[in-house]
Image (cartoon, rainbow, N blue to C red):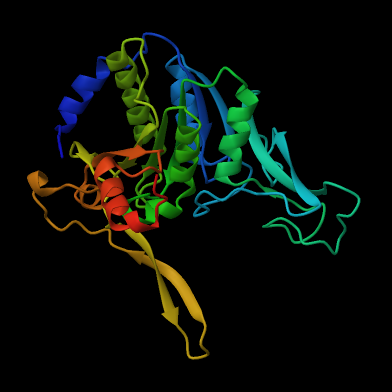
Amino acid sequence: MHTRSFLPCAISAVLALAAAPALALDIMLVNDDGCNSDGIQALASVLQERGHTVSMYAPSGEQSGQGSRLTLPKGSCTVRFELSDTDLSGAPVGDSRFYCIKATAVPASDSCTAESHLPLPFLELGQTVSASPGDSAFIGLTAFGEQKPDLVISGINAGDNIGLTANYSGTVAAAMTSLRNGVPAIATSLSVRSRDFQPAANFVADLVAELERVADGGPLLPAKTGLNVNIPAGTAKGVLFTQVGTDSTIGVADQLQTDGTYIRAYDLKLAPEGVPVEQITDEATALREGYISISTIDGDYNATSAPQAFTRLKLDSLAEQP
């Protein structure tokens, strides 16, 4: 694996060359913290300042940890999605191209009644809730029609999305939804230790400009290939190209109670461990040690050729013979 680090001054020098985009991109934003969260609003502002055309299709309320969940029809009942200019609390989102996605349980036929089994997560017919990150990404890409955005950016999330926990992340899932629909995507997250989204937004905008510069008019990223970017609190020591890995800085711990139930709490591993930079290969270690981590993610569920060949060899007797 190729790991590369830059001192903070080198980061600025390299990315400053691409700070102003050669061509404005059509960028769609999504997240799991909600359409009025600080992270997505900060990122939208910076991207617009850089000359990009920015649209937002984000959940109308908090949807952290929802993974790839889609709100699906159930029998004779279904879901109506609304592209609203306010979040669930009624607060306006601010820009005519920014949408808060709401979901309402509605009948698909007359047989859908208050007693029907409703789609999750609805408790009653007519109830309006926030769409999930996956819902929002799908709605946004559908609204674009045939002319898809040049890039989807998910985030900036308030908290790390690293290692094993990335599987449950709505931020990462929204990016993966875009990848599976043929649109390049970047999942972006800021350490749980920080709420200063401005430096993170500047870095993401610089990253986009560098992708555009290197692409030289071609695809920003290879087909079904995306990035998972995690940014530490404070001034980063540099940038590392990492693997997602199995470690995580934020996990969950289920604690057995005397009545047989379980109480869920966060399991945090945030303290630096003094790992030398040349030994850092995964996202969690990079973030703990104060580096920005960039991991390549894949929107294709197919295994690579070696695991496929192994499986077929082991299960050859089950396959139809010519």
Say left or right for 268 vs 57: left
Camera sees residue 296 = yes
Q: Residue at 64% of width from left, 32% of height from top?
A: 99
- Image location of residue 263, percent across then percent down: 48, 76
Query: Which residue is the extreme one toward the right?
Result: 110
Residue at the extreme front of the image, as rendered: 322
**247 to 78, vertically: above or below:** below
Q: In this view, does 248 lie above or below 223?
A: below
Measured from the top left, where is residue 28 in percent x and y?
52, 27
Which image quadrant for residue 19? top left
Image spot of residue 183 (x, y percent): 47, 27
Front residue of 260/292: it is 260
Q: Is residue 204 left or right of residue 29?
A: left
Please count the marks in the image: 0
| Quarter that holds the C terminus | top left
Residue 58 visible? The answer is no
Residue plotted at (49% across, 79% down): 262
Residue 210, quarter of picture: top left
Q: In the rendered view of the protein, which quadrant contains the N terminus?
A: top left
Q: Nearer the viewer, residue 217 or 239?
A: 217
Say which residue appears at 86% left-offset and 55% top-offset.
Answer: 112
Q: Which residue is drawn at 11% across and 53% down?
A: 275
Relative placement, left or right, of 12 versus 315 is: left
For the residue pair 112 and 33, the one nearer the viewer reads as: 112
Examine the image and state in which quarter residue 119 appears.
bottom right
